[in-house]
Amino acid sequence: MPDSGNPDASLFVAGYGSSPEHGLYRFTLRDHAWSGAQLAAAPALTALARHPRLPVVYGTAGTPSTGSVLAWTVGKGGASLLSSVPAAGTEPCHLAVDPQGRWLAVANYASGSIGVWGLAHDGSIDRHEQLIELTGTGIDPDRQQAAHPHQVVLDGELAYVPDLGADRIRVYRCDGDSPSRLVSEHELEVPAGTGPRHLVVLDEGAVAVSGELRSTILTGKVRDPESPWREAASTDRACPPSSARNYPGDITAAPDRALAYIANRGHHTVSTFAVGGAVPLLVGELDAGVDWPQHLLLTGDELLVAGRESSNVAALTLVDGVPVSSRILFDCPGAAWLLPAGPMDP
């Protein structure tokens, strides 16, 4: 993880939008100042991931009618496109890379599918191995007319897929060498109208989930199909200043997994919850300092926030794990995803 107190901290940023200035960026902190540049243009770039061993960055890009998966080789000289393949669906919004670097999985939001690709030895996207087409609906007539997977989270031998459209968490077994990398294990329904967007793994098989449509946070044990969900409002504020509703989005956890942080898009805040008790307990809520906080990245004693609508990235200072202040680090067009750059990036 990059630490903004580290003189050599570095981040890749996905700049979401349709103009030439949107795409893959890298920002570096030197002499207490951040500077960055665009590495590659890519329209509607939504999420980033990296190869576990190689200097390769992957991204999802697309709209409700388009979708692609990209791979770049990154280095001091910039980024060169290694692969660009159709996403086998539309509006891909998240991807996860196998810890051994053998395959990656993509959540196609609009078309309601999960696509899996093999990876070659150089990290390029190789063969399309699997397409899982999902079904299901929910009670929200505008957002839940069909299945809408929003994330793929790898947790050891299992993968979790929050399905916003079908109000469920889908659990798959990661089947090592099989052409069918993801094999269905079970599904867990969430309260009707929740619209689960993202989740973070906690201790002892528990997870915390952002409920985009009900503006909630849920905790439960996703490995247990009979586990009850515990629910709380994701914010204690009444009316968003610039939106008809509040839409909780990304969620992450402190290193000890006792606290979870959730981004409130609408209120433009980050809420902190204690997640070890009977129900999630709100212990703090802070203005994020950005508009539409799209992605969260924990870095040492700070929580970084990508502001998609304000096109900037902020750092929230943590005291005893709770955000207490915010400052802008740098501007980036459509900042939507943050990925640590590391020593493997020459």
Image: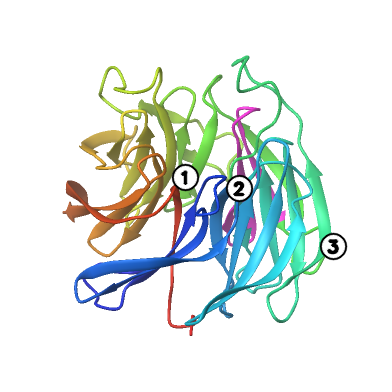
Q: Are discs 2 and 1 less than 8 Å apart at CB?
A: yes
Q: Amino acid at mark 2?
A: Tyr
In front: label 3 or label 1: 3
**Secondary structure of the residue carrying numbered label 3:** loop
**Viewport quadrant of the N terminus:** bottom left
User: Circle 1: is it few (<14), some (14-19), or many (20+) Cα within 10 Å?
Assistant: many
User: Circle 3: is it few (<14), some (14-19), or many (20+) Cα within 10 Å?
Assistant: few
Whether residue 144 is visible: yes
Q: Reply yes or no: does residue 163 show up in magenta.
A: yes
Q: Which residue is painted at 69% across and 22% down in the image? A: 137
Q: Which residue is painted at 60% across and 59% down in the image? A: 59
| Numbered label tally | 3
Please state if 117 lies on the left or on the right of 157 as rendered.
Answer: right
Distance (Cα) linking label 3 and label 2: 19 Å
In terms of secondary structure, what is the magenta stretch mainly?
A: strand
Please, is residue 28 above or below residue 173 in the view? below
Label 2 belongs to which residue? 160
Q: Which mark is residue 179?
A: 3
Distance (Cα) linking label 2 and label 1: 10 Å
Snapshot colouring: rainbow
Please, is residue 10 above or below residue 47 in the view? below
| Front-most of residues 95 and 75 | 75
Query: At which x and y percent is residue 346?
Result: 48, 85
Please state if 66 lies on the left or on the right of 151 as rendered.
Answer: right
Label 1 belongs to which residue? 207
Query: At which x and y percent is residue 118?
Result: 77, 67
Q: Amino acid at mark 1?
A: Val
* Residue range highlighted in magenta: 153-173
Q: Amino acid at mark 3?
A: Pro
Distance (Cα) linking label 3 and label 1: 28 Å
